[in-house]
Image: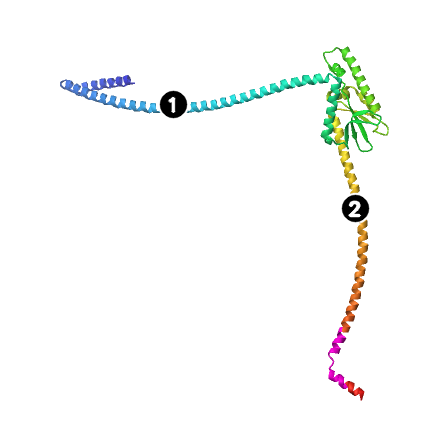
Amino acid sequence: MEYLIVGLLILIIILVTISIFKNINEANITERLGRFETNITKEVSNFKGELNKELTNDFNHLNEKLDYRLNLISDKVNERLNENFAQTNKTFISVLERLSKIDEAQKKIDSLSSDIVSLQDILTDKKSRGIFGEVNLKHILVSIFGDKNDKIYQMQYQFKNGVIADAVLFAPPPLNTVAIDSKFPLENYQLMVDKNKTKIEREKATKLFKSDIKKHIDDIASKYIIAGETSDQAIMFLPAEAIFAEINAYHHDLVEYAYKKRVWITAPTTLISTLTVIQMIIKNLERDKYAGIIHRELKRLGIEFNRYRDRWNKLARSIQTVNKDVEIFHITTEKIAKKFEHISQVDMEILDNIVDSESK
């Protein structure tokens, strides 16, 4: 920029010089050129000083703006860095929490895996499966009717013929006493639904599974339906919902067979529903029984009230009679009182005169 200005000044100087040379005499050229040079030098010096001053001011102003912008940018960068650091820290903490939860879940999965293995070990034994079914059955009865409610149900109940049922429900008439027996046919069911087995093996397992169910139905019908002691029907409890669903979805012949034998096949959900309905019936019967007692007592109270009313009417009539007698006595008393009053008002001298005159 300085070179451009100097060039312009030189050009101006040249043009001025040419003009001066045209207008002045040759005698004054040297003097005027000296003066002009001096003036030009001063002007150039002044111009350079002002230019340097303005450039310095502009540079300082620009430097201040740059510092201000840099400070703003630095503040923004620091703010963003702080925000990002806080977000990163929060994310890191969240990741640590998730990792700890995953670790806990992994521990629970490991524990659950061991529990499942132990449960499978339990279910492989028939006796253990029987105990598992009885415990499940008791849990359902306790959850609906409460613990140790012997008036409604009993576990391991023995009938008069010595047969022991897993549970007995003392339902209201006409249902009466109903035996509940737990069954858990598992081996052939697992073979029947195992996709890795051949078709022939699965068909064989299906036949054995149906045979197991029918045998359980026959045992329950023969042992737990006792004339004169129990209801004409009994309940077979399957602790596994999958087996119950398999029977109802694909083996309707077993359902019909159980219906003919008066044995109702249930799973945990259906047994809960059935027992809940029976519980409502029992509560309604209790309510009706107390309502009958209240009605009977109200009738007795009505009879006593009628007696009370008759006696009160008699007493009221007696009171009325006494009132009349009291009124009569009151009238007579008033008459006697008036006579006494008249007698007390008689003058004794007049009375003496009357007596003397009568004696003469």
Image location (x, y in percent) of residue 69: 38, 24
Q: Height in image: 297 above or below 199?
A: below
Q: Quadrant of the C terminus?
A: bottom right
> Which class describes the residues within 10 Å of circle 1: few (<14), some (14-19), or many (20+)?
few
Q: Which residue is mark 2?
A: 298
Q: Quadrant of residue 127?
A: top right
Image location (x, y in percent) of residue 180: 78, 26
Q: Quadrant of the N terminus?
A: top left
Q: Quadrant of residue 353?
A: bottom right
In the rendered structure, does residue 113 fall within the stretch colored magenta? no
Is residue 239 visible in the rendered structure shown here?
Answer: no
Give the residue at x 80% y 54%: 309
Apparent side of residue 28 relative to residue 3 in the rendered image (left or right) = left
Element under disc 2: helix
Camera-side residue of 305 and 76: 305
Q: Which residue is mark 1?
A: 70
Q: Amino acid at mark 2?
A: Leu
Give the residue at x 80% y 58%: 315
SS assignment for the magenta stretch, majority: helix
Tag 1 near tag 2, CB within 8 Å: no
